[in-house]
Amino acid sequence: MYKYDQYDQAMVDTRVAEFRDQTARRIAGKMTEDQFKPLRLQNGLYLQLHAYMLRVAVPYGTLNSAQMRVLGDIADKYDRGYGHFTTRQNIQYNWIKLEDAPDILADLAKVEMHAIQTSGNCIRNISSDQFAGAAADELVDPRPYAELLRQWSSFHPEFLALPRKFKIAVIASDTDRAAMRLHDIGIQIVKNASGEIGAAFYVGGGMGRTPMIAPLIKDFVPLDQLITYSEACLRVYNRYGRRDNKYKARIKILVHELGKEEYTRQVEEEFAHLLTQGIEPPLAELERIIPYFADPAYEAGASDELDRSDPDFALWVDHNCHAHKQPGYMVATISLKPVGGIPGDASADQIRLMADLAKQYSFDELRVTHAQNIVLPHVKKSDLYTLWQSLDAAGLSTPNLDSIGDIIACPGLDYCSLANARSIPVAQKISERFAAQDKLDTIGELKLKISGCINACGHHHAGHIGILGVDRKGTENYQLSLGGCEGADTSLGTITGPGFSEDGVVDAVEKVTDLYLSERKDGERFLDTYRRIGMAPFKEALYG
Amino acid sequence: MKIVTGNDLKSGDVTWWTGSGWSRHIADAVDAGDEAEAILARESAAQRVNAAYVIDAERTADGIRPAHIKERIRALGPTVRLDLSLDPTATPERVL
């Protein structure tokens, strides 16, 4: 994985020193909160319901074991013994003291990490496919391109005060595992008819109060124009994005209001101009980055055999492991969704254990997924059983990936100052209702996502079943939606009708799954059945 | 009753105005009544507490109960991690 050069390290170290000074001045009363707030937000430090919250960037979700171990140590040393992995492939700590924040950033900087641009109206952490570099179906590893974009977007002086926040995802497979088309810019690395590698640009997607699926605006941008084209997309947005209205300020609104054709025309015009300015970094920089993402030293001739005699292990393999491009290896996903647990939370001990297991069994690499799980991307099949035993002993072997138990949930009103309703208790009750493994297996793939407010951090619009918590006259109420999907066939969920109480929405989810089971045809997933029979039968089951 | 709340500048802890200072326990909060706005102005200037504001609450048999669920959760802690609550007798039911 990428290693900082002296410029990267100097930038991060300088920022730590700067923030240490700013924090000291704030605590000494030499700065007001109005003056300090934008500075702390630029360093990922929010003030939430109960305390300061620090959001740490995990670029394109990739970590090494030393970084993961430090994340565990921070949870112990500065927080309350746990961290929360987020839908942006980052980690958040919920109980940070302001006076500790500079020390935490210094600890992070020692392992080439930071919290820069995890907040504010700037280009946020670039997200990517959690199986990058390992997936059997990828064209190339998308992370070198994500890293190039990270370098371009870090402290980019023109884009530090955009109309609103800006999120970019980069993938390189037809199977979209990163919700790419629900980003401000989604980039898919593709091959054209001449066999050249380039980038397809999807612009203007997003969730929030006005969810939109990004349209394709350019099907092929040569790699030596990747940054220039990105810059053109951002420039048009920066120039015409709605700064007058926070709720209409995201690029999706601009693209929608201008229309895809007009937005694209303006981007092309800007692109043509920028090509004359020579802003593209030399290809040598990309060529410098690519070797950092070279394949690890796989064992030649590693056995493809897997002893499945332990039924619990076999179950976990079937649910949580995926094909690897290298014979004899698999991609193992650690579910952070135990029955009745808090989605995405992991204790300091669990975080350190995952770091150790990555060191021992996965060439020192981990990934954070947007579904709030952790991936060990390169595990030898012959090591899988021993790995599973270690995970099982630590409560990390729940075999529920992509099932109704693998729920995405934002922190909700238990932690978040923006939330209108709690998300986590609903997730806990649903996972308990569907705890029986045979029930989970009978239902099959079903992605359920919960947000505690319309900002949609829990991706409810993209849930096969989505739940949105709202405040109805001071009482929590939950809207149900069906038919969302974040993959290659991205779709947005449709609200079923009137909302439900906390317990009522759990019953409603069960009614929906019961109807699906009674109506499905052979081989159909929940989403397939929904798309075939439509909303009406589900409405009838819920409200009839 | 009107009570004044905010987050402690250094720790970020939820804090409540007691009439003479700030406490992490809502049980120590006092009715700020007509003085609420003056307290806010004075305490904002003192910069010990971030983003202080006034909320509605009532005194019940169980103690002071903020009118809105968000403030009740602030007073208690996350309902899903009651082990982190300041109140060892806390239950989600009491909050909701």
Image (cartoon, coloured by chain):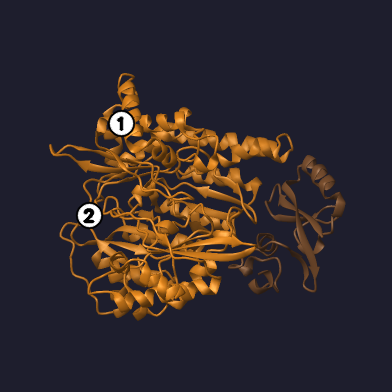
Residue at image point 59% right, 53% down? A418
Q: Give the structural element (helix, strand or loop) at label 1.
A: helix
Q: Colour of chain B?
A: brown
Q: Which chain is orange?
A: A
What's the CA distance linking mark 1 and mark 2? 26 Å
1 or 2: tag closer to the N-terminus: 1
Q: Chain of mark 2?
A: A
Q: Nearer the viewer, mark 1 or mark 2?
A: 1
Query: Is residue A154 placed above or below A391 in the rendered structure?
Result: above
Tell me which amino acid carries mark 1. Answer: Glu
Side (left or right) of A313 relative to B14: left
The residue wearing badge 1 is: A285
Residue at image point 53% right, 33% down? A14
Q: Give the structural element (helix, strand or loop) at label 2.
A: loop
Residue A276, position in %: x, y? 31, 19
Determine crowd level at label 1: few under 14, some 14-19, many 20+ residues with C-alpha closer than 10 A.
Answer: few
Query: Is residue A51 placed above or below A537 in the rendered structure?
Result: above
- Find residue A459 and report its image quarter: bottom left
> Can residue A156 be seen in the rendering of this structure?
no
Tell me which amino acid carries mark 2. Answer: Tyr
The residue wearing badge 2 is: A298
